[in-house]
Amino acid sequence: MDRPAHAPLRLWVTRARPGAEATAERLTAMGHHPLVSPLLAVRRLKPRLDLTGVGGVAFTSRNGVAAFAALDPERALPVFTVGDATAESAREAGFRHVRSASGDVTALADLIIAQHGGGAVLIAGAREPAGDLPGALTTAGVQTRAAVLYAAVTAPGGRGLAALKPASLRASSSTPPAPPAAWPT
């Protein structure tokens, strides 16, 4: 990666681990100084998985793959993933038949509807999912079953919050770029 044309910035990486470290590595390679202090932590849950009648598994994140792999040795079912990074994690966990939607939850629903071979689709994911994959699949006539495998919980953000004091996120004496006119909601 190329070095930035501007002065290095001190950046607070708020995403949950283990992804936070990968983000910090990319920022460091770009010449910045990341501070890893997640606002959320992933807590694995321990539900009983019943795969009777399941014809495929849908994962919307690497966290879902890791939690499922820790709970059940099943690796022969077809797997559908929201994106390529999640598909890579599924392959690394030993799943043999992995298809990536290379997109978002809508693309994942479209992939499952087009390629699912029958049986229920087990949606292995978070307590509070980002999208409505079950709704999209059910509307298309695909039977679904939810498996809540992990929860995102508040993590102590002390180091990151302390870094928000005026000027402490700057890595040099140069003026940081102005914030956007409106923060996204």
Image (tube, rainbow, N blue to C red):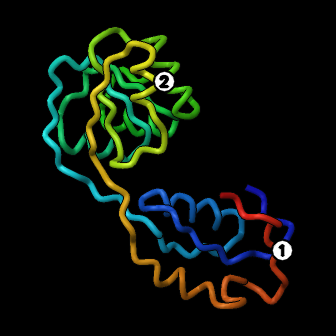
Out of 14 and 4, give the one closest to the viewer: 14
Circle 1 crowding by C-alpha within 10 Å: few under 14, some 14–19, many from 20: few
Mark closest to the chain's N terminus, 1 or 2: 2
Inter-mark Cα distance, 1 to 2: 39 Å
x and y percentages locating residue 15 in the rendered image: 50, 62
| Residue lying at 39% horizontally and 12% vertically, measured from the top left | 141
Instruction: Check residue 178 in the rendering and tell me which mark sits there, or answer none.
Output: 1
Out of 81 and 181, give the one closest to the viewer: 181
Name the side, left or right, on which 48 lies relative to 25: left
Callout 2 amino acid: Ala
Q: Quadrant of residue 42?
A: bottom left
Circle 2 crowding by C-alpha within 10 Å: few under 14, some 14–19, many from 20: many
Name the side, left or right, on which 25 lies relative to 144: right
Instruction: Check residue 26 in the rendering and tell me which mark sits there, or answer none.
Output: none
x and y percentages locating residue 135 in the rendered image: 43, 27
Q: Quadrant of residue 177?
A: bottom right
Quarter that holds the N terminus: bottom right
Out of 150 and 10, give the one closest to the viewer: 150
The residue where tag 2 is placed is 109
Callout 1 amino acid: Ala
**Residue placed furthest toward the top:** 117
| Residue lying at 32% horizontally and 28% vertically, measured from the top left | 95
Quarter that holds the C terminus: bottom right
| Residue lying at 39% horizontally and 35% vertically, measured from the top left | 59
Q: Quadrant of residue 155?
A: bottom left
Q: Is residue 77 above or below residue 45?
A: above
